[in-house]
Image (spheres, rainbow, N blue to C red):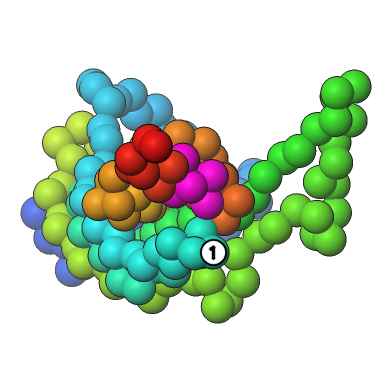
């Protein structure tokens, strides 16, 4: 076996027979390489739960996320900082798509929102304080037990934000916001239609 840069007998792992340098000195080559192939026996998926709490200004159609929680199971977590960074960034990405970032086109198909002057993105003031909690159930089909976490923040957050938003108009008797991004003008139209519907006819 090879351990710690040296070759040893499996029965006596502490007794080094030769180092890698010793072997290279006796061979007509300057390097040693190896390769291996691993094939997954099945797919591995991470799972999680997102909870979004927000307030809605019914007069302005303005949304403010006040609390955001993620419980994530990415299997064996190799680097906690990277995992939480993926989740924080993914949640903000989804907040942008759900509430801010609108691609507008004219009748000829020309993009109208091609600069940050007219393409709205969330700022630090719009970024929720995302609290992340971890469950770790190792995958049975990967070598290291990891499941991955790359898209987990974005996938869950889109639904969490829109569902939390739609809870508010429903309490006012209005319909659901079924467009993304749910900009203040889109939200205000839904609220105004609900108010008009609720008024008794003369």
Residue in view at x 18 percent, y 40 percent: 139
Q: Is residue 6 depicted above or below 138 in this figure?
A: below
Q: Is residue 169 left or right of residue 24?
A: left
Tell which of 52 and 14 is nearer to you.
Answer: 52
**From the image, which quarter does the C terminus lie in?**
top left
Q: Is residue 168 depicted above or below 88 in this figure?
A: above
**Image coordinates for residue 101, horizontal then vertical, percent:** 64, 50
**Image coordinates for residue 198, horizontal then vertical, percent:** 33, 42
The local secondary structure at tag 1 comes to loop
User: Is residue 189 part of the magenta span, yes or no?
Assistant: yes
The reply to whether residue 31 is visible in this rendering is: yes
Residue in view at x 26 percent, y 33 percent: 44
Q: Is residue 28 depicted above or below 129 in this figure?
A: above
Residue in view at x 25 percent, y 52 percent: 171
Image-quadrant location for residue 19: bottom left
Residue in view at x 23 percent, y 21 percent: 41
Tell which of 6 and 64 is nearer to you.
Answer: 64
Image-quadrant location for residue 199: top left
Q: Is residue 162 left or right of residue 104?
A: left
Q: How many marks?
A: 1
Rate crowding at label 1 as few (under 14), some (14 to 19) or many (20 or more) other CA atoms within 10 Å.
few
Q: Is residue 133 left or right of residue 137?
A: right
**Image coordinates for residue 95, horizontal then vertical, percent:** 49, 56
The reply to whether residue 166 is visible in this rendering is: no
Q: Is residue 179 left or right of residue 77?
A: right
Q: Main secondary structure of the magenta part?
A: helix
Q: Which residue is mark 1?
A: 60
User: Is residue 181 part of the magenta span, yes or no?
Assistant: no
**Image coordinates for residue 97, horizontal then vertical, percent:** 55, 48
Q: Which residues are magenta?
A: 188-193
């Amino acid at each position: 076996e090879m351990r710690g840069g040296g070759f040893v007998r499996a029965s006596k792992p502490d007794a080094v027979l030769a180092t890698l340098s010793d072997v290279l000195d006796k061979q007509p080559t300057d390097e040693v390489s190896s390769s291996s192939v691993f094939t997954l026996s099945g797919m591995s998926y991470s799972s999680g739960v997102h909870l979004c709490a927000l307030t809605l200004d019914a007069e302005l159609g303005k949304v403010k996320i006040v609390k955001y929680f993620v419980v994530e199971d990415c299997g064996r977590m190799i680097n906690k900082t990277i995992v939480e960074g993926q989740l924080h960034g993914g949640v903000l990405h989804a907040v942008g798509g759900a509430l801010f970032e609108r691609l507008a086109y004219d009748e000829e198909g020309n993009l109208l929102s091609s600069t940050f002057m007219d393409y709205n993105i969330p700022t630090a003031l719009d970024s929720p304080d995302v609290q992340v909690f971890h469950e770790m159930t190792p995958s049975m089909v990967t070598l290291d037990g990891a499941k991955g976490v790359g898209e987990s923040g974005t996938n869950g957050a889109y639904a969490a934000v829109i569902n939390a938003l739609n809870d508010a108009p429903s309490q006012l008797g209005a319909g659901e916001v079924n467009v993304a991004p749910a900009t203040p003008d889109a939200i205000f139209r839904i609220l105004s239609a609900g108010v008009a519907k609720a008024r008794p006819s003369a």
